Structure formats: C-alpha cells, structure tokens
Image: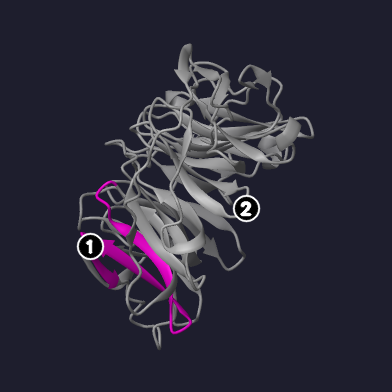
Amino acid sequence: MKSIRCFSLLTCGLAGVVLSVVDIPSAYAWTNENPGSASQCAAVDVNDAGTVVENCKVANTSAAFVTVAGSTAQLAALPGTAGGVPCSVSMINNAGSGKETVVGSCRDANNVSQAVSWNSSSPGAPTQLLPFAGLLGIIGNGLIAGATGVNVQGVVIGKSIDGNDSILPVYWATGSNSATPLNSPLLAPQANCVPVDINDAKTPSAVGNCPGGRLGGGKNVAVLWPTLGSAYSALPVPSGASYCSARQINVNGQILGECIYGSDTNRTVVWGGGGSGPTVLQTINGSPALRTVGMDLSDTGLVAVKFLAGAGQAGFYEPALWNPTSSNASSIALPFGAIHGVVLGIGNNGKMVGNYETSAGDVHPFHVEAGSLAAVDDGAPAGGPNARVTAWSKGGVYEAGWAENSNQAAQSEVQMIP
C-alpha cells in the first residue's frame, strides 16, 4: 500500500493506464482534537464519519478518548480497577456516527491488560471481552484476552491466552463479551493461531496466521476462515516461495499478505476471493523488486505498498501503488525536497496517505489524490516542525495523526483528506 517513486517530468503506468505526475495544490484544514485535560496526544484511528479515537497523557497517566461530532469524552476504565488504572484505544469500526464500536485494552484489578470495547456515544465503563473459559470452565481456562480487529457489525476478533501462554483464536459476537473459538480442520493445529483481520461482508470472513508445526514444516501458515463458524483453510503458497503470512481481507474477500523467497526476498501478494491465486508483486516501474511490503488493501482491490529502493535511495523504503490485475506496481513521487517516505494507507476512493522526511530532517504527512501518482505535502499543522499521519478512514475521507506544537508537545490532529 506504499507508493512508488516517480518524478514530475516522467509518467508512471498503472495497470495499462499512463498517469501524469504533477503537483496538486493542497489546502490544509486540520482540526486539533486534544482534550483540554490531556497532553501528548496522538490519534490512533478515524472512520468515515470523522469519529476519532486517541491516546493521551492525563497527569502522566495513559488515557483514551473518543471524539464524536466534535465532542470529546474520555473512555472510562474497568469499574473493578482501583484508581482507574490506564486504558488505551487501538481501533474503531466504520459504523455511523455515535454508533461505533471502540476497541482497546484496560488493566484489570490484577493489573493485567485485557481487551475491552466501548460504545462511542456512551463511553462509560467498558465491556471486558472475556477470554475463553472453555467447557465448564475447565478446557480453555483463558486468563488474558487481546483484540486484533473489528468489523462494521461490531464483531471483534482476537486471541485468548491461557496459563501456559497458549493462544486460542477467538471472536466476540456483536454485543457479546463471551469468546467463541475459531475452528481448525481435522488434525490441523489450532493452538497459537492468531486472527489478524475481519472484513465487513454481511457474512464476515477472517484471516490469520498459524504456526506450521508438523503439518507446515515449522513454517508460518496463512489461513482463511471463510465464515466465523467454519474451519480455516490454508492459503496457497505461490511457486518458489517458502511460506506466506496474511495481513488483511477486504469486503470482497481479497486477501493481502506477504511471501518469503529464499533467505533475503519478501514479496507482496494478493489472494482472490476464497483464497484463490495468489498474484505476486514482481516489479516496480518494470524493474525487479525483491523486498516489498503491502501496507493496505482497499475494497476496490488497490494496494498501497512500500518497497526497498536502490540507487540514491538504497536502504530506504519508498511508496508505490499496485493494482493486482498485473504483477507490476508504480512508484509515487514524493513532494519536492523529500529525502524518502512511505505510504501507509489507501481509501476506497483511491486516495492515499503517508509520511515523508524533508530535506531539513523533519517529518510531514502527505496525501495522494485518486488517479495521481504525486504526493502532496499536508504540512505540520500544530506549529512545530514534525507531524505524522497515523490513521485514515476506510473510505479515504479522513486522515488523522499527531503534530508537534511550538513546545514540541504532541497534538492529536484530523482533517478531511484534500
């Protein structure tokens, strides 16, 4: 999902279409989301309604906040935790404004971090997402729960960890705090499988990674749960690859991942619906690319990619855009004076966001318009030298992150992507 490097006097092809690379003027419209009681804030996630979740410091204690329709509220800690032991937020789903599920973690009464969820419109005491207790509370006997994803319906996926540090892949149905195990095929491993993403389909699918063990030769196995009630299937490994890992699944069932070749090559891959394929990213601008990482997959099938560059950018990752209908990606031209940079996300509207380092050594966010391969500087909105985008909405409507003010204190910032 990172962009590939082009230059302003050149053109870059994408899936047979030639796109001109030009600078596009940008108007900054950042909004500071820092709560009045907080300091050192950073936005963690934002959705298409513009609802933002952020982590801050309040009196040197970690605290989580949500901003809905311009109104900010602190997300409460677990009621049984003395003194409001710290909480943090990690994600928000793409439901309508005030109807979102916010997912994060809070310390329990034993000072152990546990997965929790809040409702964005009533962010009082969270719901603790319980680990799997197992049959009669004996088999399973989970002690810790951790969340790894949430879909638009509010279904949360994650892991349940028992007293032996063994991981069980689980999900929490909408409105439930009870963990349900995800299934494995007969004789296939289930222990220590970790789901990493769930899609927004009416009947959702999930992807994850399982330890290879005897059946996988000790190598990681990327897996697909076609439904939350079915057993997983192993995703096919492309010819010449040693093994693969899964990262993301979109609403149409396309899966983003990465495969390892030999001892020093990793390539971005996309599997089709049901785990078909995969298509492997082989080249950037027609030249072989030995190290690529898929950063984000849109519901339209486009991928933001970062690739290890050569020549003057040797040793640095650079941004690119990939349409998996071919095995070639196109680099993205960074703003004038950039040293290097990477793209982080792509929305369903085709807009991309990322960060780059300026010639002065500062870091700025950038965006890329749909249909363009030119990154536009999004500035440093809080008055300090550095800023970073850390989150973007699924539709590509909003970007959020943090920026330093003149005192070098981090401020949470959000804007509609220009």
Earlier-in-chain disc, 1 versus 2: 1
Classify 10 Å Cα crowding around label 1: few (below 14), some (14-19), many (20 and above): few
Q: Which residue is under mark 1?
A: 70
* Residue 67 appears in view: yes
- Verify whether residue 17 appears in magenta: no
- Residue 86 versus residue 181 in the image, above or below: below
Residue 125 image position (x, y, % from top left): 29, 75
Classify 10 Å Cα crowding around label 2: few (below 14), some (14-19), many (20 and above): few
Q: Amino acid at mark 2?
A: Ala
Q: Would residue 284 appear left or right of 233 to someone viewing this image?
A: right
Highlighted magenta segment, given as a residue range: 48-73
For the C terminus, the image quarter is top left
Q: Nearer the viewer, residue 80 or 410?
A: 410
Q: Amino acid at mark 1?
A: Gly
Q: Which residue is pictured at 35% across the width and 45% down the height?
A: 393
Residue at the extreme right:
263
Q: Secondary structure at mark 1?
A: loop
Numbered mark located on residue 360 in the image: 2
- Verify whether residue 55 appears in magenta: yes
